[in-house]
Amino acid sequence: MGWELSGYRLAVALFNRGIEVVAMSASWVELGVAPGTKMAVRDVWRQLNSTATAQVHDPAVPGHGVTLLVLTPADAAR
């Protein structure tokens, strides 16, 4: 699920409704981002930065947990 923010940013929440830790991802197509767009990715709660070009991924979303990410087009993240 994604929400538009100011400055062409996008907030993305990966919701794990199960009880087990699972890997979760969301592709650019699912988020409405043009394929091949390079995005700066900020994990809000872990306070980690990375980049992505096709999808966002979290290998360990806890049971009944959420990963909250903010995506910024790489050319706007400077």
Image (spheres, rainbow, N blue to C red):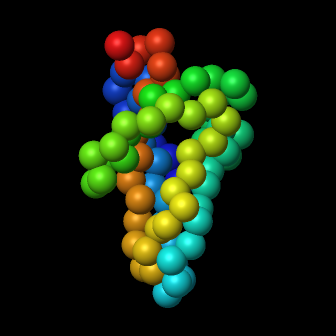
* Residue 53 found in image quarter: top right
Q: Is residue 69 left or right of residue 16?
A: left
Q: Is residue 31 left or right of residue 74?
A: right
Compared with 37, 69 (above or below) is: below
Is residue 4 in view?
A: no
The residue lying furthest to the bottom in this view is 19
**What is the quadrant of the C terminus in the image?**
top left
Residue 76 rendering spot, x and y as whole percentages: 41, 14
Residue depicted at x 37% and y 47%: 43
Compared with 24, 73 (above or below) is: above
Residue 65 rendering spot, x and y as whole percentages: 40, 72
Is residue 77 in view?
A: yes
Instruction: Count all numbered tags in the image, as a single digit.
Output: 0
Residue 72 rendering spot, x and y as whole percentages: 43, 27
Residue nearest the viewer, comparing 16 with 53:
53
Q: Is residue 39 left or right of residue 6?
A: right
Compared with 37, 62 (above or below) is: below
Residue depicted at x 45% and y 29%: 40
Residue depicted at x 28% and y 54%: 45
Residue depicted at x 56% and y 51%: 57
